[in-house]
Image (cartoon, rainbow, N blue to C red):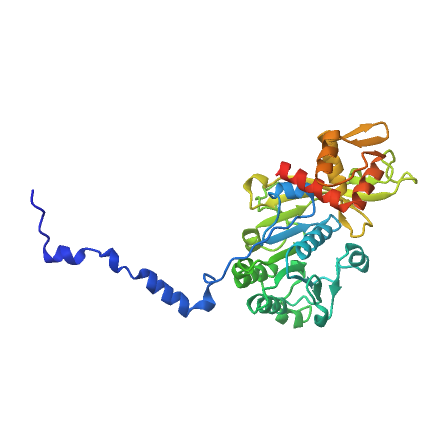
Amino acid sequence: MPPKIKNKEEKEQEVDLTKDKSNEELGQILKENKEDHYNFEERSSWKISTGSLLLDTAVGGHLNPSLIRVCGANNEGKTPQTLEIVRNFLKDVPNSKAFWVYSEGRGLSKENVERCGLKFVYDYNEWETGTIFVLESNVYELFIKCVKKLVLNNTQKIKYCFIVDSIDGLILKDDKAKEIDQNSRVAGTPMLSKKMLQSLSLGMFKFGHLMILISQVTAEIKIDPYAKTPNRGGTFSGGNSLLHGADWIFEFGATYNSDCILDNPNGKLNDGKSKVIGKWTRVTIQKSAIEASRKQLISYPIKFGKKPSGIWLEYEIVDTLIAWEMIKKAGAWFSFADSLVDQLKDAGFEVEKQHQGMDNLRTYLEKNPAITEFLYQKLKNVLS
């Protein structure tokens, strides 16, 4: 059958794919508007630990450039967890600095600063790689100006970790100047949070930075006490923008007397003999980049007075090895299993196999950080 002869109108309607210029047209638009997008920028990434073996396992082994919300009531572990993440960021991310917005006047007490093992500076001339600059201000506009300047004019490719302690303490400059009996602008923290994410989030994480927002729990006043409360992913402040914009939300719950860790395992709280040396803190992953870990409750130990203070990794490692029978108990003695001793020897470590008492075993790991790191990596790889 002879091919159909197309008329003039049909020929004009045909599309010649060889003459497609959409790529060129799009490219021209992007080149003319470089300030409005990040398509020409290289994505930067890194991996750091949360500081906790159990929490690392829940988040898939590590954290990446992201927005993290750390929420909860006072004295429930928010600051130790934040400091642990900052410490690992400065240690493991090359050419890195931290920027701490001190908006509430608490949290960074002299004792906390001395114990955490990190260097805080208040003079911008002293802000060097591996240190934390503290901005003592709660003015929202100043915070945004600092972050945008550091992120967008970053010719030295420095990686920043920004911490806001806390988001509840930020205030608009106009509102700060008003008298206490004058009306402040409606919306408060939710509005500030939305503006902040609109200004910063896309470029922030494309360039490999980290932001940690600390916030408090809030109480909802209900006219009907029996009315059902919708699940918004937690009872903390900041508005829906932070719920949507955060990659991770860690909510720290209440701890109880039974969560205290005593220097005498057989002692009792307030018995006049036992000293509290730590506690088990509880954190629920309210939002996660890994769906399987959402709503997961993690409990891990924090040691008081430790230098650097924070998450008690050695405690976690020992507990996990005992649960897996890689450490065996006989009376007051704890012994590494032969198979584990062989693995440590193969890795180049000479190990004391037996230890009298749990405290001595944990102290042994604290004094041998290389062995602790080997065991941590081994357990994390298996658990993750």
Q: Please, which residue is most extreme toward the top here?
A: 330
Query: Can residue 27 be seen in this snapshot?
Result: yes
| Quarter-of-image position of residue 123 | bottom right
Q: Please, which residue is most extreme toward the right here?
A: 272
Quadrant housing the N terminus:
top left
The percent position of residue 264, horizontal first and vertical second, equals 87, 37
User: Would residue 171 appear left or right of 322 to someone viewing this image?
Assistant: left
Query: Can residue 254 be seen in this snapshot?
Result: no
Q: Residue at x 10, y 53 (%)?
A: 6
Q: Residue at x 80, y 31 (%)?
A: 335
User: Would residue 126 appear left or right of 46 to someone viewing this image?
Assistant: right
Q: Residue at x 75, y 35 (%)?
A: 319
| Quarter-of-image position of residue 135 | bottom right
Looking at the image, which is closer to me, 147 or 384? 384
Looking at the image, which is closer to me, 198 or 313? 313
Vertical order, 120 against 228 (above or below): below
Vertical order, 207 against 49 (above or below): below
| Quarter-of-image position of residue 339 | top right
The percent position of residue 322, horizontal first and vertical second, equals 75, 32
